[in-house]
Amino acid sequence: MMLSNLNLSSLPECNFEVRYVDSVLLNPCAEYQRLLRMGKVAKIAANFSEYIANEPKVSYRDGRFYVFDGQNTVEARRTCNGGKDVTIRCKVFYGLTKEDEATLFAIQTGNATCLTAGERLRANLVAENPDALYFVGITSNAGVEFAYDGIRAPWKIYCIETAYELYKQYGCERYVEMLHIINEAWKGNVDSYLAGVIRGVARFISVYEGEYSRERLVQQLARTHPKTITQLAQKDTGSSANRHMRQILRIYNGASREMSLPLKN
């Protein structure tokens, strides 16, 4: 799981108590917390039972109660109370910073709604996780941002999990070069950041490192819409990276014999 290997030893000594808190006092921290999932809230409320309900995890900081795990449950309890605030049994932690809360939010488990890659990355940034900060920094310096909200847009990477996987697999230098080539070829086209495309380009520059012409690769890719690469790759066999790499190799070679590269696995 992306960026989940956080060092919990960095957290302060665990100090908490179970206590009742009026829901009007329970606040989400917008910097790392996600928006309420009203569908999830309705589902919890429709099947609510004290036998299975978990206490929301709350941080008492600067005189306020911040919910870092269980925001939907809090709202569901309000729903079950006719939409009015209600006293809720919570697990209240003391001595946590905002960064500590974000760390815990990013690795929450149990019955919590699974975080998207964007939500987890954003939380890790608030938590000042060094790997997350570096990963986002080199990506931004390459001219691309992440679609934390899950909405595809030009110059934004939607498949955050895949990007992080490639960063770890191929290293910083090849990861950044992959982004530069894509940016130069397709000028921020939203489809150029599809998972298969970035896998294929990363695989190509790794397999043919020192053999391919960078200028030719950019020029040849620019002549083909990135969606065409994914459509052709779907008809091939093998891993996603290899299927897309083979299409990129075909585009790179074109009709040239002089510049043609052999197929490698």
Image (cartoon, grey):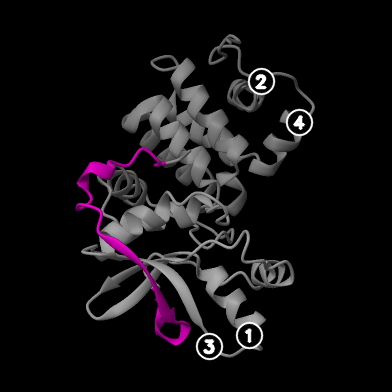
> Which of the two discs, 1 and 4, sits closer to the camera?
1
Assess whether residue 257 is covered by the magenta stretch: no
Q: Disc 1 marks which amino acid?
A: Asn
Task: Name the residue carrying label 3.
Answer: 85
On screen, 63 above or below 101? below
Q: Which residue is rendered at x = 62% and y = 49% of the image?
A: 191
The CA distance from mark 1 to mark 4 is 51 Å
Q: Earlier in the sequence, mark 1 or mark 4?
A: 1
The residue at the point 62 percent across, 59 percent down is: 52
Q: Earlier in the sequence, mark 1 or mark 2?
A: 1
Quadrant containing the C terminus is top right
Q: Please tell me the numbered disc located at residue 81.
A: 1
Q: Nearer the viewer, mark 3 or mark 4?
A: 3
Decide: few, some or many residues near mark 4? Use Cα within 10 Å; few <14, some 14-19, many ≥20. Answer: few
Residue 234: image tag: 4
- Please tell me whether mark 2 sits on a helix, a strand or a loop: loop
- Indicate the secondary structure of the residue bearing disc 1: loop
Determine whether 202 is above or below 150 in the image. Answer: above
Residue most toward the right? 235
Judging from the image, what secondary structure is the residue with disc 3 in?
loop
Residue under pointer 2: 255
User: Which portion, as a residue range, is magenta?
Assistant: 3-28
The answer to whether the residue labelled 3 contacts the one labelled 4, judged by CB atoms less than 8 Å apart, is no
* Residue under the point 30% across and 80% down: 64
**Callouts 2 and 3 close, C-beta under 8 Å:** no
Look at discs 2 and 3 and give the one toward the viewer. 3
Which labelled disc corresponds to residue 129?
Answer: none
- Tell me the amino acid under the disc marked 4: Gln
**Which residue is found at the position 48% from the left and 38% from the top?**
1
Left or right: 47 as drawn, with respect to 146: right
